[in-house]
Amino acid sequence: MDASFIIPLFNCLELTRTCVETLQATIPRGLSHEIILVDDGSTDGTREWMVALPKPPFVALFNERRSGYAIGNNRAARIARGRLLCLLNNDLEFPPGWLEPMLAAHASRRDVGIVGNWQYRIADGSLDHAGIVINLDGKPEHLDRSQRVWIKPFGVSRRPAVTGACCLIERRLYLDLGGFDEGFLNGGEDVDLCCRLHARGRKILVANRSRIRHHVSAAVGRKDRDEHNSRRLCRRWRARFVLEGARAWPLHYLRMHWHEPRDYDTRLLWQAFLRWLGLVWWPAREGMVTVNRNLLREEAHWLATLGHEKVDT
């Protein structure tokens, strides 16, 4: 079988119906597939709807209580039969032609780890995701329209991470990595997986011609563990976040001194300019110092709000 589409569910039945209908309408002909739905304790009729779906292509799994995004995906991946896993949220809508660029990107080189795409907010049509970068605070954030200088609309782009809302990965590789880390609860699992792929020498790609629509965090309780997840993620991958976050420093420095042209250090200005042009690839020391300082401030915030919580890294 070519692909297994995995969709974890918790309520939001109407969104799920639209997601599944547009998915089925846009899967390329000849692509052998299954659609695995994992219900996480829904109470709005989702379970009854799932039972009535035709088998094949549908496979229905039921959790007796809410277990979270990572556990649901991992459970489905273990029974999946497809060579590729396409991990999806249930609040997506798929236009024709969205999948083919992702498949092409995955097949483009042997060291591909995972492939993401562009996602637009259904509410206002704005670009929500064209990959994930690490900012100067040492935190992951979506590339969107506010950072359009980094975005190209064609081919593929390499990024530090992509969102798990819609991504493509080889099933054998996913299982070999142990899947999503189940210590994360509805947040951070995707970035952690991408960091583990990078540590193995795998590339994280965005298929820029793959475009879908996303309601964005429609599930109730999606943000409840954000601070805990962020703390766990940053502690585990701090060194990588410092290096990646420092890449945001050149543009930040240039923008800052564009408005204050008389108050700048010539040496730093040249360092920033050369890195912004891509003529120097290694991160600037000043950028790493900035990210480290911001992460120390964030650690103090977590200590004040979460206390001395033991974080397994």
Image: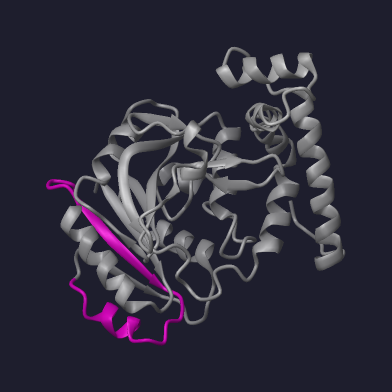
Above-or-below relation of 240 to 308: above
**Magenta includes 50?**
yes
Counting from the top left corner in percent of width and height, residue 25 is at: 16, 58
x then y, percent, for residue 88: 38, 57
Magenta highlight range: 27-54
Q: Is residue 165 magenta?
A: no
Total numbered labels placed on residues in the image: 0
Direction from residue 308 to residue 184 in the image, left or right: left
Report the front residue among 128 and 2. Answer: 128
Closest to the observer, 149 or 96: 149
Question: Can residue 77 be seen from the camera position used here?
Answer: yes
In the displayed structure image, the side of residue 200 where residue 157 appears, left or right = left
Q: Residue at x 56, y 17 (%)?
A: 277
Scheme of colours in the image: one colour
Q: Is residue 144 at all visible to an observer of this figure?
A: no
Which residue is depicted at the point 33% across and 27% down? 108
Q: Position of residue 19 (x, y in %)?
A: 29, 65
Q: Residue furthest left?
A: 29
Q: Quadrant of residue 229?
A: bottom right
Q: In the image, what residue occupies the spot 57% across and 32% down?
A: 200
In the rendered view, would you say 87 is above or below 159? below
Q: Nearer the viewer, residue 85 or 258?
A: 258
Residue at 21% x, 45% y is 97
Determine whether 196 is above or below 121 in the image: above
Name the spot of residue 293 as percent of width and height, x first: 83, 40
